[in-house]
Image (tube, rainbow, N blue to C red):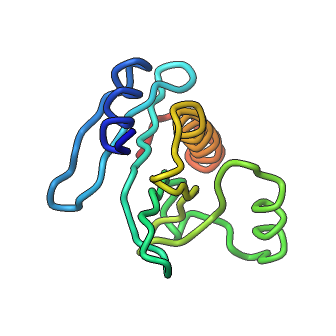
Amino acid sequence: MDFDVLVHKLANQKGWNLLYLKDEDRYRLQLETTGDRRQDVYVSFRKDEREDWIAVIWSVLADVADFNLSDPLELLRFNWRNVWGKLALVGDDVVLVQHQLTDEANWNEVGRAVEEIGALADSVEAQIYGDADSR
């Protein structure tokens, strides 16, 4: 199945708000998390060294200025502990990112990746900023 079609069908079935950000060439999925909170999960695309298309599924955790970067070993431990997503820096944002071959993508794994990235990002964001849905 075409990855764009897959994203649209997943959003429709799961009740996620979907927006295509044309200027940024990416999708924004807004998921309901706990309470009144919501979390944006983005999907953009890159080519790898073999010229295969890769879906980059990611969500912002915090501004880099608000994120504790004082213990690099703990950041590496965080990446090891978490099955879904790894920490990365995009501009001034700390993000949780997961990669997926688009040609190999299926309904269950993409849906699960979006849900897990959204839930974990929201949880970390809440630890940093409190209960207010700040981002």
Q: Pinpoint residue 5: horizontal percent, then vertical percent.
A: 31, 36
36 vs 87, left or right, is left
Pick the front one: 108 or 92: 108
Residue 46: name its quadrant: bottom left
Q: Nearer the viewer, residue 38 or 105?
A: 105
Taking the view exactly as shown, the residue that stands out farthest to the left is: 23
The residue sitting at 51% across, 32% down in the picture is 107
Q: Residue at x 83, y 54 (%)?
A: 81
Query: Up-down: is 72 above or below 110?
Result: below
What residue lies at 58% left-to-right and 44% top-to-bottom? Answer: 117
38 in relation to 27, above or below: above
Label tally:
0
Tell which of 61 and 22 is nearer to you.
Answer: 22
Residue 91 pos. (x, y %):
41, 75
Residue 105 spot, x, y in % from top left: 51, 45
Residue 112 x/y as whole percent:
60, 34
For the N terminus, give its image quadrant: top left
